[in-house]
Amino acid sequence: MTVTTATLTTLTATALAAPLTPLADLAAEPRSQEVTDWADRIGWVVGLLLFVALLYWLMRQGWKWRGTLQSDLPEPAAVPEQGTERDTGQGTAPHEPPRLTLTGRYHGSTTAGQWLDRIVAHGLGTRSRAELTLTDAGLDVVRPGARDFRIPAGDLRGARLDKGIAGKVLTENGLLVITWELGGRLLDSGFRADRAAEHAAWVERVNELSGGPIDVAAIRHDKEGAA
């Protein structure tokens, strides 16, 4: 069988062109399908936004309901203005220099010994930055963007190191918890200093000033037993 040069040229050209045909077909196919179900997608987005709004509304209502249940709790004392005088029981004395100061965060307050029983009345449930000042008159809590309050020295019941309060969990001994009394009710307030090494000095000074620490485990046991 004789194969001419023309025949070989034709066969070679056909063999080279054959693999390119599927590639050309693939290149001609669209890379993505055009979206035609915009109405369905918009409906899903609107539904999701409504669901999130409902959850937020329920959380707000729960917060208000808890505040209503705690309406019998009196308002904490206000922080005196700088430069004012305090009553010592024997006349007045100039405003005393602070014994300890601390900057950090306020993580909320709870019923003493019950770290999930959040107190929200009078703004005590609002987490915020905080500046603490401890003097012989008590503890001043200044909170930018939230309500300031004072814990008089006579209402301090002790301090301890802990790891969680009001749904906030930190490392072991990462939280300074101060126990105090408000309207006959014992509360725990949690603070986290910018420099956690300061916590130990605060525990020592607050317990020295208050005669604490109070046994919060006993408080928790009494409440659980009563329930």
Image (spheres, grey):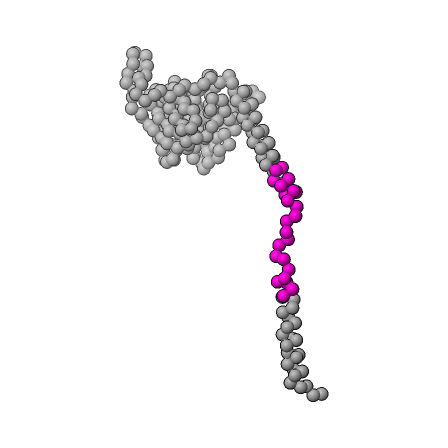
Q: Report which quarter residue 86 is drawn in.
A: top left
The segment highlighted magenta reads 24-47
Q: Position of residue 187 (x, y in %)?
A: 46, 23
Q: Residue furthest top?
A: 90
The residue drawn where x is 37% and y is 24% is 140
- Of 19 and 163, the residue lying toward us: 19
The residue drawn where x is 58% and y is 29% is 58
- Of 213 and 50, the residue lying toward us: 50
Q: Is residue 37 found inside the magenta-colored segment of the image?
A: yes
Q: Report which quarter residue 159 is drawn in.
A: top left
- Of 170 and 57, the residue lying toward us: 57
The residue drawn where x is 50% and y is 30% is 166
Q: Give left or right: position of 28 versus 105.
A: right
Q: Position of residue 44 (x, y in %)?
A: 63, 40
Q: Main secondary structure of the magenta part?
A: helix
- Of 148 and 170, the residue lying toward us: 148
Q: Which quarter shows the N terminus? A: bottom right
Q: Which quarter shows the C terminus? A: top right
Q: Is residue 32 found inside the magenta-colored segment of the image?
A: yes
16 w.r.t. 127: above or below: below
Q: Give left or right: position of 62 versus 187.
A: right
The residue drawn where x is 54% and y is 20% is 68
Q: Is residue 25 visible?
A: yes
Q: Residue furthest left?
A: 94
Q: Give left or right: position of 59 versus 135.
A: right
